[in-house]
Image (cartoon, helix red, strand yellow):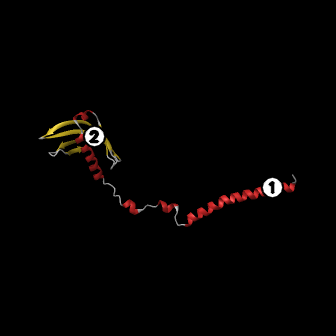
Amino acid sequence: MEPDLTEAINREKSVTVYRAVLALVLPACLTLSACMGGGSSAVSVLSVDPVTTAAIAPLSAESEIMSDEIVIRDLVGGLSQTDFATTQPWSNSLTGSAGVVSNLATLNDGARPCRMFKTTRHSFDGVSLLEGRVCQRPDGGWDLVSLDRPEG
């Protein structure tokens, strides 16, 4: 090949490469500039919507404990005598707390049957060991009479 022909071929290749790069880069730049010109930015997308988050009231510490007490009461009250021999796990999806009921025993408080138990409570504020007692009402439901940390 002659030098003039080689130069012409190389020039044509570089023009083709330039056009290919331009054909790829130009649409990308136009697309990005359209996104940025719309007024939305990454920072505005990350801002907190107060209407959405303010609609969900957080639970107070007292209501979390009350909710856990209801779950524990319902579990212990609903157990059969054969379930007393094994530990019984519980969890509260509302508070995220969980634990294990153990050491179940029955006793009578006057005319009504009661159940004594121990349970752990694993929550965001730590792990607790609790002792409790539930007693049956005349209508068949159960009342949580006590749920406290053991003395000593």
Residue drawn at 73 percent across, 56 percent down: 17
Q: Quadrant of the C terminus?
A: top left
User: Observer-nearest residue: 53 or 129?
Assistant: 53
Residue drawn at 25 percent across, 47 percent down: 70
Query: Looking at the image, is 6 positioned above or below residue 131?
Result: below
Residue 49: percent from left, percent from top:
42, 62
Residue drawn at 86 percent across, 57 percent down: 4
- The answer to whether residue 7 is left or right of residue 61 is right
Q: Residues within 10 Å of mark 1 (few under 14, many from 20)?
A: few
Location of residue 132 by image quarter: top left
Extreme-right residue of the structure = 2
Q: Label 1's element?
A: helix
Q: Amino acid at mark 1?
A: Ile
Reading the image, the residue beneath label 2 is 119
Extreme-left residue of the structure = 111
* Residue 77 seen in the current view: yes
Query: Looking at the image, is 149 positioned above or below residue 7?
Result: above
Q: Amino acid at mark 2?
A: Thr
Disc sitting over residue 50 in the figure: none
- The answer to whether residue 83 is left or right of residue 23 is left
- The answer to whether residue 23 is left or right of residue 99 is right
Residue 30: percent from left, percent from top:
61, 63
* Cα–Cα span, label 1 and label 2: 85 Å
Q: Residues within 10 Å of mark 2 (few under 14, many from 20)?
A: many
Reading the image, the residue beneath label 1 is 9
- N-term mark: 1 or 2: 1
Residue 76: percent from left, percent from top:
24, 41
Q: Label 2's element?
A: strand
User: Observer-nearest residue: 22 or 152?
Assistant: 22
- The answer to whether residue 45 is left or right of residue 134 is right
Residue 104: percent from left, percent from top:
23, 36
* Residue 150 seen in the current view: no
